[in-house]
Every structure is written in structure tokens, then in C-alpha cells.
Amino acid sequence: MVYQMPPYGVQAMLKEGHKHLSGLDEAVLKNIDACKQLSAITRTSLGPNGMNKMVINHLDKLFVTNDAATIVNELEVQHPAAKILVLAGKAQQEEIGDGANLTISFAGELLQNAEELIRMGLHPSEIIIGYTKAIDKAVQILDELVEKDSAIMDCRNKDEVIKRMKAAVASKQFGQEDILCPLIAEACIQVCPKNPANFNVDNIRVAKLLGGGLHNCTIVRGMVLKSDAVGTIKRVEKAKVAVFAGGIDTSATETKGTVLIHSANQLENYAKTEEAKVEELIKAVADSGARIIVSGAAVGEMALHFYEVTTSPSIKFALVQLLKSDIDFFFLFSRWLMVLKISSKFELRRFCRTTGAVALLKLGPPNQDDLGYVDSVSVEEIGGVRVTVVRNEEGGNSVATVVLRGSTESILDDLERAVDDANPDIALCVPGNVGSRIVPGAAATEIELARRLKEFSFKETGLDQYAIAKFAESFEMVPKTLAENAGLNAMEIISSLYAEHAAGNTKVGIDLEEGACKDISTKNIWDLHVTKLFALKYAADAACTVLRVDQIIMAKPAGGPRREQPAGADED
């Protein structure tokens, strides 16, 4: 009989099949290595000259982009430590709308420098203390670098709006920012309410239409629905709108019943009764003054028939006059009811915001207070696609749509991301927020932070001074990456920047077009202070969280072996 030693320690505590990693080599350094691999993927996409990544997700959908938030979201990162960096990047994207790449790349650089300190003999706790002191000092320095009088901003001044969104758009569409920024700024100004503090990013919509190019992009004061109108009426101007959240059709009863019909006359009368009921409802809607009907569900054939033949009493009188004269019948046709179908409940809510209408649950005559108003609704063909354009210019508007044109879906998706990154920046800049403050861009702020933090580290006496110095050195990642992505000599650029900033020129950054260091205030390159602030805070918090982990304990996964998902199927 073979005697087996009973398990002890963690083996005795957990089920068979668990994993337990501890110590510097197994836990800390492996976590750091996973985070370094993730930041290495996103780092080359940093800046205006960032390279694109081709990502194919589990649904075989292709993404060609340099947007870090999209990249890490579609990669489906599994490593628990790398997931912390992903969560930091997502938090930055959701809170600010821009700077996710800086957050992930800077956190990876902090962990790479922390690895060097660990191999030198420093304990992770000493590194965390040094990093905490460094981020607190960096926030103070960042406040000192804010441009004077930038906290006061006129939200309806187009030049001021463009100045604050230009960097976010250029990082996604370098060279196209002079075309895109005026469009986005105009859309922001159009939907800006009387109290700018109530600015809503959701009021700026994007419609992507294949064909044409960037010079064909336009702004519509209203909505662009990527669907055709139901029926034959394709254009109506200066009309009232009735919105019904449910379908426009004959209602079915909840209970089943049997109808006995003994003759053809009874059958004919039964059908006529149903028709008469629908016609009565449609006439009631037409008599209310509404000339455009919007349905949130299906539109029945019978209802559609009555919409196109039902006229209000005033139009009936016009019909009599038309029969007595030779006036063109176009006037009559233009007064028929136009029917639109909007299946998405979110789009239906935006349509109600655009027109000022109230969505009714039941088909019936609406009150005058429930009706909306539009200047024009027309079906147009753009790039071979029939779209319904809802304009509301004279009556004021709370929704604006940026119509983007491009040759491929990937280009349109990238243009949409550029617009989505710019909009939250403007929302942060409204009066009452400190988000309108700006700091020098083009790596000028990072080099100044690195220089001052190195000076600060010399004043510290403990071992944490080495961590503060490494934190300062991590800032060099930004100018180094910008220079490398632009094909410049990174060491020469960084040396020139340090020399200029040591001489007191704190606004000197990298001019990527000329490949030299210049005063970026003359180039009008600025970054939002709030974007830098949150990116550095999230990155430092993520790095310290990873460094605090000294053991990884994974229980045995529940269930048996997982089946392979068929191609194109989701886990749910």
C-alpha cells in the first residue's frame, strides 16, 4: 500500500484544479509583463501619425482604426492584470471622451520603469509611495501650466470651440481637422441651449453615407433617417407632426371569438365595419391639423390607404374648387398625409426632441399640445441611398446631424469616432466647468512635467526618490512615441525639448509637419487640461493597483469543457 501525503497549505484549502501564483517572479513581474504587452499594442497608435490596427473580433467583424478604446474593447483581453488597464482606458473614454490611448500607454510605461526598480531591489510598496507623491506633484504642476484666461470661454464662439477640439480630431484624422472641426463646431453651437450647462452630447447625431469624400460632409439642422417614407408622399413643408409610439393598424383583441356569417352581404358589411373604424381614426388625426404621421412600429396597408386618400375639411373644399377649375392637382397631392416609420425607440425620442412632439401610445386624435412642427421633411437620394431628411431651422432646433461621406465603411467608422471624441470635449467646456482650461499640446506639457518632477525627486531623501525619478522619466514616452511615429529621431527631439524648456520656453513642442521643435502657441495646438489630468490619474491608479498584487489565486472553472462556438455566433 502506497501512503500518500495529505495536501497542505493552499492545496488543502482549494479544490483540485486551482492555480496559485505568488512572489515577485510568478505574480508581480508576470502581471507587469502582461500590461507591457497591452501598452505596446496601443502605443504605436498614439498621436496624429499613429499607426492603424487591423482587429477582427469574435464575430468576424473587421476594425481598421487607431482608436485605443475600440482596439482594447474588441481584443477581449483575458489577463486579469491587463484588464485593469483596459478598465482605466474605458473609464477615461466614458468620462472624458478622449485620452484612452494616453492612459493605457502611460500606465504601461510606469509599470515598465517599476520593473527596473524591482530588479534593482526596491520593494513594490516603496515604488507605490513614490508614484503617489509624484502624481500629486504632477497635478500641481499641471495647474501651473494652464493658459491664462482659458477658463473663460464663449460656447457660441466658433474659433474658441475649434481650438479645444482640434487636438482630439487631429489624433484620429490628421490633416483633415481643418475640414471636420468647423463642421463639428457648427453642430455644437446649433444645439447649444440658452443655458450651456444643459448641453447634451446625444443631441449631435452622425449619419454615415457611403460615397463621395470628406469635402461632401455637411450639417443638417435636424435629423437624417436612413429609411424611405412609407407610401407615395415624399415631401412636406411647414407641417405639424403627430407621433405614435405603437403601430398604426387595426387593433386585435386579446381574446379569441367566433363570428357566424350566413350571407355575402353580412361578410361585406363585416369588412366594411373594420374599414370604417380605421377610416374614422385616420380622419380624426387628419382633422387635428397633422400632415406628417410618425409610427414607432408597423404601418398597416389599410391605414396607409386611408392616410393617402383622407383629407381635412379645408382640403375637401379645395377639391371641389379644383373640380370646377383647371388648377394643377399638385396642390392637393401636397396636402395629403406623409407617413414615416421609425423602429428604434431611441431614434423616436430624438425625433420628438427635434420636432417638439409628444409620442402617443394609442392611435387617436392628438391634442394640439402633443403635435410637433417641422420646416420640411423630404426623401432625398445621397450616394445611392434613400434617406429622409427632417429639417427644423426656423422654429429652433435641439438636434443637429453631421452627415459623413467616405469611400469605405472603415473610413466612415473612423470619421465617426473623431466626431464622438470631439463632442464630449465641448460638453466639458461649458461655463461652470473647469474643463475649458487648456495646456500646451504636442508633448510640451509632458516634457515640462518630466523636467520639474526630476527636480522634485532630488529634494526627496528616502528610497521613494528613485520611484519619483522613474515617474518623471515615464513622461518621455509621449514625445518619443510622437517622434518615432512621425519618422523623426526621438533622442534629438527629446534633447532639444529639454534644452528649450530649461531655458524657460515652456510652450515649445514637436511640430510634426516640419520635424522640429517650435512654440506650439503659434501653431494653435492645445490640449484640454481635464483630459491630461484624468489620464494621468487613471494611469497612476492602475499602475499602483497592479503593483499591489503579490498573489494570484484562481479557482477551478465551473462546469466541464466549453463547446466551441459556431462561426459568427455570440456567447449569449
Image (tube, grey):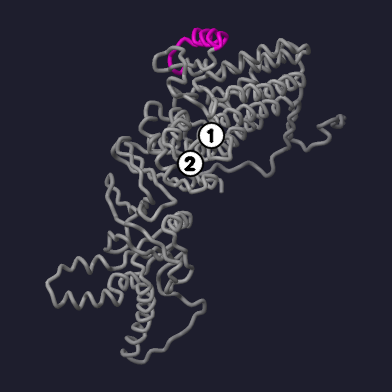
Asked if residue 75 shows in the view, the reply is no
Outermost residue on the left side: it is: 326
Quadrant of res 529 = top right
Q: How many residues crowd mark 1 within 10 Å: few (<14), some (14–19), many (20+)?
A: some
Asked if residue 531 shows in the view, the reply is yes
Quadrant of res 530 = top right
Q: CA distance from mark 2 to mark 1?
A: 47 Å
Q: Residue flagged by tag 1: what amino acid is it?
A: Ile
Majority SS type along the magenta span: helix
The reply to whether the magenta stretch includes residue 114 is no
**Judging from the image, what secondary structure is the residue with disc 1 in?**
loop
Say which mark, if any, is on residue 59.
2
**Judging from the image, what secondary structure is the residue with disc 2 in?**
loop
Residue 75 or residue 170, whichever sits in front: 170
Q: Residue flagged by tag 2: what amino acid is it?
A: Leu
Q: How many residues crowd mark 2 within 10 Å: few (<14), some (14–19), many (20+)?
A: few
Residue 474 or residue 369, whichever sits in front: 369
Total labels drawn: 2
The first of marks 2 and 1 along the sequence is: 2
* Boundaries of the magenta span: 484-504
**Whole-percent x and y of residue 166?**
44, 30
Say which mark, if any, is on residue 152.
1
The correct choice, above or below, for 108 with respect to 462 in the image is below
